[in-house]
Amino acid sequence: MNGNNPATIAPSPKKKRKNMNLAVGPWTPYWYILPAFIVMALMVFYPLAYGIYLSMTDMSLATFKNPNFIGLGNYAKLLHETAFLRTFGRTIVWTMVNVFFHVTIGLFLAVLLNRKLPGKGILRVLLIIPWAVPQYIVALTWRGMLNNQFGAINIFLQKIGFAAVPWLTNPSWTFIGAILTNIWLGFPFMMMISLGGLQSIDKEFYEAAEIDGASGIQQFRNITLPLLKPVLAPAIVLGTVWTFNMLNVILIIAGGFGNEKTQILVTEVYRLAFNFYRYGYAAAYSVVIFLILLVFGMTFMKRSQGLEEVR
């Protein structure tokens, strides 16, 4: 029989608190972020590292099991290809035109919706619809509207006296049609971001500016834009990355990889990987795209000072 007094065996309340406090130590924050770090390592870091390795091999359908390490061979070949340079230039045009209209239209509509306007709630819902509908549904709808013979756009153009446009048969017009589709898809995001930023601006700034006699344009340039910068700069970077990597709209409007003049870098990656099975070469394309967007994002945020507080 144990002769120990139970009171001496059971830990005192003070000792219990001490043991619980041992769980809060200098390593505790790292334990909390460990699950997120493991997920990031499996979902982001490992695929990125494997993609970089793949880009330095000649992996294809023929060498799938035993790819040869060729170092920077794929990159040297890629950068000397005129087709890559043409596609890169087309991707820049695609991205700049789309992001410009996303920001311009989105900001204009946000300023409009931030004012007293009848039916503002209904207008907000209607303007969000392009963003709420799945991309491939919007792209398929626009492809039908761009049909050369039966499309609504050509019918409208002919009714007002213009000739029908070969949207889906001429590669240049197909590319323009894809840009129109993506502008339609992208402006609601910028509108919502801008509207949220506008509603956080203190009205006293505008009241003080009106007392000083500032015009509407001066208020927009000196109050609205500087105070929207912390909101708009990250949104522009996000919009640029999404537009640069847009695959669905190009493939659906162009009807696949039919013509080189309708393709951008990311569709070329898809074609190389899943049509020609040149996995190593496609991985080199992907790494170059990643580096382009990384440099752009860092440079833009630094130049725009988008992460700094507004003074």
Image: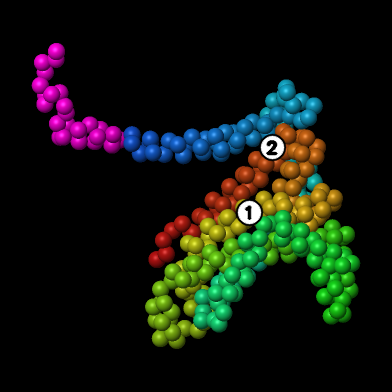
Label 2 amino acid? Ala
Q: Residue at x 57, y 59 (%)?
A: 236
In the image, is residue 7 part of the stretch drawn in magenta?
A: yes
- Using the rendered image of the protein, determine whether residue 240 is visible from the camera's viewpoint: yes
Q: How many numbered marks, from 0 up?
A: 2
In the image, residue 69 lies at what x, y percent? 69, 25
Lateral position of residue 310 relative to residue 289, left or right: left
Is 119 on the left-hand or right-hand side of 289? left
What amino acid is found at the position of numbered circle 1 in the picture?
Answer: Trp
Q: Quadrant of the C terminus?
A: bottom left
Mark 2–mark 1 contact, CB under 8 Å?
Answer: no
The N terminus lies in quadrant: top left
- Where does the magenta region start and end? 1-26
Residue indicated by mark 2:
283
- Within 10 Å of the Cα at label 2, are there few (<14), some (14-19), or many (20+) other Cα atoms? many
- For disc 1, the marked residue is 242
- Asked if the magenta segment contains residue 208, the reply would be no
In depth, the one of 132 and 288 nearer the eye is 132
x and y, in percent, of residue 138 in the image? 72, 60
Q: Is residue 27 left or right of residue 67?
A: left
- Where's residue 259, x and y in %? 84, 51
The quadrant where residue 22 appears: top left
Counting from the top left corner in percent of width and height, residue 233 is at 53, 60
Query: Which residue corresponds to the image point at 63% horizontal and 47% vertical from the top-left?
Result: 292
Compared to residue 254, the image places residue 165 above or below, namely: below
Compared to 305, does 37 lie above or below? Answer: above
- Work out whether residue 3 or residue 307 is closer to the camera in this orientation and state it: 3
